[in-house]
Image (cartoon, grey):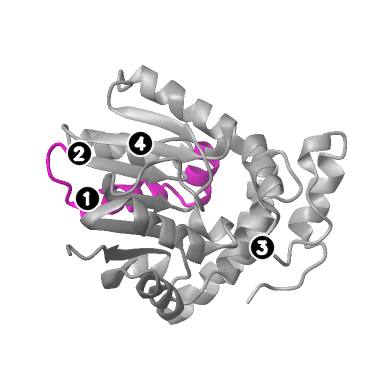
Amino acid sequence: MMRHREAPLSRTLGRLLFAWKTDARGPGRLDGLMATDNVRGMFETIASSYDLQNRLLSAWLDTHWRNVFVRCLGLSDGGLLGDLAIGTGEIALRACRRYPRIRVIGVDFSPHMMEVARRKIRRRSLEHRIELRRGDLRRLPVEDGLFDAITIAFGIRNVGQRDDVLRDCFRVLKPGGRIQIMEPGFLEVPVLGRAYKWYFDHVMPLVGNLLSGTDYAYTYLSETVYAFPSDESFIRSLKGARFVDTKVILLTYGMARIYRGRKPST
């Protein structure tokens, strides 16, 4: 459940330090998913420093999680991957490195995030393998049965209509195609888990807001982790969208979670 907190320290300090920045201020309350335009505006604001923030706040564990995530795909040569909520392109770039003959279509709703991705793609001369399209995850700008696999890394929890996203993913996958989703979670080790939750509640939002130059971005992102469904509930959503062979893979004792499913072959 989403917690009801008006202005934790992470927001109060941000308001004091960044009061002069009009794009640094978030909604008054963060106890529910923000509207799509507000979420887009948040990612527009933090795009340039997003990768650095993730590295520092996860102590570089996010690079390990992304590498495992891509390795779990097991793509065949020549396949087409749909990387949804592509963000700054980290998954697409890793996938192209691991699977030298695949192509990727990346979809995102934030022009600034995609511009960061575009610069990385150009630096690696991968324009011929990675195509970027601006679009909404709830109604993807691609035809039916296009992708061999779909990935969504750290993106679906920011969408209120997750069932719509999953149904449209089913639509654009080929028969037998796989969906793979990754989201953060909580450490499932009793003593360390409590310490990590304290860090997640108090330190990570505070430092993240300072790094992002906002009063709300990482406070909000931490709240969305609390609001995300349990493993059992999200697996039910995957099954409700007609995916089969569903499973959950825990990374770093649950600090990140991979959800997998497959579109039936017939």
Q: Answer with left or right where residue 117 lies relative to residue 64.
A: right
Q: Can the viewer see residue 183?
A: no
The magenta segment is: 51-79
| Circle 1/circle 2 CB separation < 8 Å | yes
SS label for mark 4: strand
Disc number placed over residue 31 in the picture, else none: none
Q: Does the magenta stretch include residue 66?
A: yes
Disc number placed over residue 202 in the picture, else none: 3
- Amino acid found under the numbered disc labelled 3: His
- Between disc 4 and disc 1, the foreground one is 4
Helix, strand or loop: magenta stretch: helix
| Circle 1/circle 3 CB separation < 8 Å | no
Q: Disc 4 versus disc 2: distance between alpha carbons? A: 16 Å
Q: Answer with left or right where residue 122 lies relative to residue 67.
A: right
Disc number placed over residue 105 in the picture, else none: 4
SS label for mark 1: helix
Residue 80: x, y in percent? 24, 40
Q: Disc 4 versus disc 3: distance between alpha carbons? A: 37 Å
Q: Quadrant of residue 249?
A: bottom left
Residue in the picture at 17% in, 47% down: 75
